[in-house]
Image (cartoon, grey):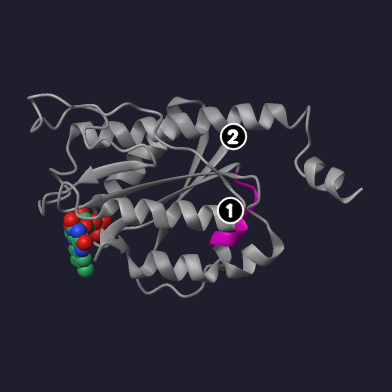
Amino acid sequence: MSKIAIVYHSGFGHTDVLARDVARGVTDSGGVADLLRIDGLQADFGEFFDRLADADAIIFGSPTYMGTVSAPMKAFMDASAKVYFTKQWKDKLGAAFTVSGSPSGDKLNTLTSLAIFAAQHGMLWIGTGQNPGNNDDESAATDAENRLGSFIGAMAQAANDSPDVTPKAGDRATARSLGRRVALAATRWRAGAAAVPLGAIDIQMMT
Ligand SMILES: Cc1cc2nc3c(=O)[nH]c(=O)nc-3n(C[C@H](O)[C@H](O)[C@H](O)COP(=O)(O)O)c2cc1C
């Protein structure tokens, strides 16, 4: 059974709604989800790093603040430099989701930042794998999966409404699909480790 950690920050509850949908998707695919919510004032990520050590995949979630990840998410990213030096996350799978007030809101930059972060850790990136869900006249509809047309990660729009009513059904389904997809990929990746143990490629390169 694959273990999927979901590390996220949420200032006002919208990213939290999505994180729980991602976790539902993980469970749909038979995985185990470990939700790790960053507290705004958090400085010590020791317990997070302990729990992330044995995860097969890490899904990062951040609201888009000022066109990029929120400050608490960035604090977590910077604190992970310790893990970076020991390459603990190398060959884990990675993915991300974000929410912003506007349909664009420059949130692609948030997902790009998280993908680069994962690449620095040597992780393998999983996108949505979904075609854009709503390229037609019904462009205002909120129930189509991947209605915002993102490939690099799951996008949602909060439209400055309460987390009780936004993100809406389509965006929430997109998040759930991402959880399903990552958990399935992690199960395949674990099964493949029987044929090619993790680290084998590095050893070959050294000999
Ligand atoms: C400090 C701050 C900066 C924000 N910057 C953006 C932005 O650049 N683009 C955007 O569309 N929305 C922006 N928003 C709106 C948030 O992305 C939106 O409310 C989101 O749902 C917040 O997620 P959360 O409830 O998980 O914190 C900003 C909100 C805050 C508080």
Q: Which residue is mark 1?
A: 52
Above or below, 112 relative to 81? above
Helix, strand or loop at disc 1? helix
Q: How many marks?
A: 2
Q: Quadrant of the N terminus?
A: top right
Q: Quadrant of residue 71?
A: bottom left
Numbered circle sitting on residue 2: 2
Q: Are marks 1 and 2 in contact (CB under 8 Å)?
A: no
Label at residue 24: none
Up-down relation of residue 95 to residue 85 (above or below): above
Residue 120 falls in image quadrant: bottom right
Q: Is mark 2 within 8 Å of ligand 1?
A: no
Image quadrant of ligand 1 equals bottom left
Q: Position of residue 114 (x, y in %)?
A: 43, 55
Q: Is residue 10 left or right of residue 38?
A: left
Identified at 50% across, 70% down, the residue is 78
Give residue 25's position: percent from left, percent from top: 40, 31
Q: CA distance from mark 1 to mark 2?
A: 13 Å
Check disc 2 and give the amino acid type. Answer: Ser
Density class for disc 2 (Cα within 10 Å; few <14, some 14-19, many ≥20) is: many
Sequence-earlier tag: 1 or 2: 2
**Does the image show residue 82?**
yes
Q: Which residues are magenta?
A: 48-55
Q: Position of residue 42 (x, y in %)?
A: 42, 72
Q: Is label 2 in a helix, a strand or a loop? A: loop
Q: Is residue 36 visible?
A: no
Q: Residue at x 58, y 61 (%)?
A: 49
Residue pushed farthest right?
207
In-front residue for pair 4/112: 112
The image shows residue 108 at horizontal and vertical percentages of 31, 50
- State yes or no: Cβ of the residue under disc 1 lies below 8 Å from any atom of ligand 1: no
Viewer-proximal residue among 130 and 3: 130
